[in-house]
Structure formats: C-alpha cells, structure tokens
Image (cartoon, helix red, strand yellow):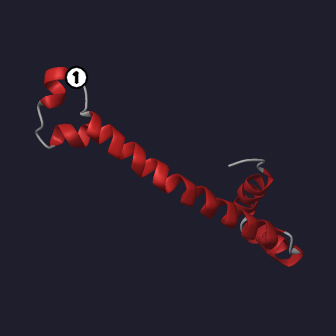
Amino acid sequence: MLHVFLQQGNNKVAEDGQLPMEMLQRDLKSVEKSYGQNVLSLTLARSQLRKLLDNPEIKKFLNFQYADLLQEFTALVELESL
C-alpha cells in the first residue's frame, strides 16, 4: 500500500514519514471485513475436500494421477486450525 501511495506522487509520506491515519484505518476495516468471509470459505472448502478424500476411489485416482496434490490436500485436511 505504501508503494502505491508513493507512486501516486503524494509527498506527505516523505515529509513526515507516516501514512495518514485515515488510510490506515480504512485498510484495517477492509481486512477485518474480508477476514470472516475468507475463514468461512476456507473452512467450507476444507470440509468438502475432507469428504472427497474419504472416498477411496477418488483418493486412489489422486494418488495415481496427482500424488503431489493428494499430499497437499491431505495436509490441509489434517490442519487443526486455519
């Protein structure tokens, strides 16, 4: 974000060495707003992945065709927290 601010030709950063507080607060609110949705999406995706890996035929196929992906998927499913 700082580099974008500097690229826009705003010299305020160079003058006082700080970003305006309004920009920091806006960025924080944006992150807070998307965090909950992102965690929910990841939780649901992990749940679906777990169901797929519980199917022996799918697991066998992945092991034969995409062993590297199976290893990564298994690691994701076994995580205790995101």
Task: Give the amino acid at mark 1.
Answer: Gly
- Mark 1 Cα shell of 10 Å, populated few (<14), some (14-19), many (≥20): few
Q: Residue 27: x percent and y percent?
A: 36, 45
Establish if 45 lies above or below 10: below
In the picture, the quarter occupied by the N terminus is: top left
Q: In the shown orientation, is residue 70 left or right of residue 9?
A: right
Q: Secondary structure at mark 1?
A: loop
Q: Residue 57: x percent and y percent?
A: 86, 78
Nearest the eye: 39 or 60: 39
Establish if 68 lies above or below 31: below
Query: In this view, which residue lies farthest toward the right?
Result: 56
Q: Residue at x 47, y 54 (%)?
A: 33
Q: In the shown orientation, is residue 8 left or right of residue 3?
A: left
Establish if 3 lies above or below 15: below
Nearest the eye: 25 or 46: 25
Q: Residue 3's image quarter?
A: top left
Q: Residue at x 75, y 66 (%)?
A: 47
Q: Residue 2's image quarter?
A: top left
- Identify the residue position indicated by label 1 in the image: 17
Q: Is residue 1 in sight in this rendering?
A: no
Query: In this view, which residue lies farthest toward the top?
Result: 16
Q: In the shown orientation, is residue 41 left or right of residue 33?
A: right
